[in-house]
Image (cartoon, rainbow, N blue to C red):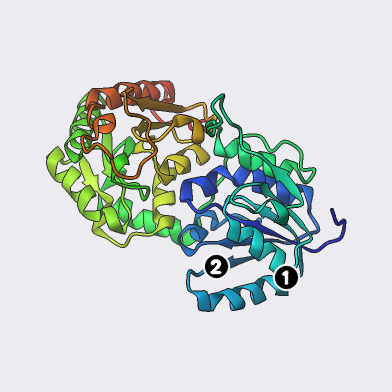
Amino acid sequence: MTTGDGAILVFLPNWIGDVVMATPAIRALRAHFPRRPLVAVAKPYVAETLAGLPWFADTVLLDKSPRSYAPTLAKLRRHRPEIAVLFPNSFRPALRARLAGCTTVAGFARYLRHPLLTHRLYPARGPGGSFKPTPALDDYNRVVKLLGVPDPGARMELATTPADELAADRAWANLKLHRFRRVVGLNPGGAFGSSKHWPAAHFAEAARRLVAASPGLGVVVLCGPAERDQAAEIARLAADVNVVSLGDGPLTLGLTKAAVRRLSLLLTTDSGPRHFAAAFGVPVVTLFGPTHVGWTETHFSAAVHVQKPVPCGPCQQRVCPLGHHRCMTELTPADAVSPSLELLRRFTDETTGATRHAG
């Protein structure tokens, strides 16, 4: 490996939650190579995830258009990169890294890219040869350790910008959330696919039960632009003045981060905001259906995973192949509310009533 001060290209994962799980590795990479600029290479929809953190000198956005390939390579080459860290497993990041001039390329040897890598890892496999679920966070740490980086640990990290906080201030004021001692967030979304969705009626019932069990508690339903109607439906079905939807105003990823940071607890599907909560030390209950907990375990002490065993799962499919969606519909509101109340109890200061965020 080169020992100069050329740039390091960090190809970020393609999912928002995975970007958060890569933060321990990125932080450790930054500390280990203090003279080298880090350049994030990312899909546009994940780039905002790390806004507010001081690690990157620049961010180069990837466009799907074939016409953007040459201009993107030119942007990468201007940084005179020597090293590339590949968090995605696909072939294209490895090819881009080589064409950009990187002489050291670290990542998992998958999708025929083995010859393009100088530092290789191989995925764990079970007795039958199938991939064995291993936490993505641990795998990202393994990638940077190939370059001599000390063990990054498991503490995920995020930040918000002043604009994010201003947007959250406005939302809290508009929704009158300051009147509550504690605010619980519900996150019904998930870009993965409909197989992860929990019924709106279940979310609404969980919200009513949480409010009834905890005086002074309010519930806000989080959402991105695509889940605006879903969030409004949950608030409508809850039919409680203490349950409101965030979707009445402008929606950004930064607003979601700032909103999650203020919560006492997040009840969520297995999606990106689940990892926002852990990064900000907010207790989180995650409802798992078609996805295997082992792939996204974050070792966060204030996290509870809820999953119903079904004969067909976890199938890892975006849409239920059998059409019944049992892995999610059989998760009852009680299954979600019970661990949520327990986490609220554990992380509430008995003297002040304030939430103690987990470290």
Q: Is residue 303 above or below residue 15?
A: above
What SS does tag 1 mark? loop
Of mark 2 and mark 1, the one earlier in the sequence is 2
Name the quadrant containing residue 167: bottom left
Q: Is residue 202 left or right of residue 296?
A: left
- Element assignment for label 2: strand
Q: How many marks overall?
A: 2
Residue 155 visible (yes or no): no
How crowded is the residue under tag 1: few (<14 C-alpha within 10 Å), some, or many (20+)?
A: some
Q: In the shown orientation, is residue 271 left or right of residue 90? A: left
Query: Which residue is found at the position 36% from the left and 41% from the top?
Result: 317
- Quarter of the picture containing the C terminus is top right
Question: Residue at the location (19% across, 40% down)?
Answer: 200
- Is any part of residue 60 visible from this angle? yes
User: Which numbered tag is attached to residue 63?
Assistant: none
Give coordinates of residue 295: x percent, y percent: 50, 35
Image x and y of residue 187, in percent: 32, 42
Disc 2: CA contacts within 10 A as few (<14), some (14-19) or many (>=20): some
Residue bearing the label numbered 2: 61
Residue 28: quadrant of the picture: top right
Q: Is residue 217 above or below residue 334?
A: below
Question: Can you tell which mark lies on residue 79?
Answer: 1
Q: Is residue 16 above or below residue 61?
A: above
In the image, 39: left or right of 147?
left
Q: Which residue in the rendered view is the most extreme toward the right? A: 3
Residue 311 in picture, x, y percent from top left: 31, 23
Residue type marked 2: Leu
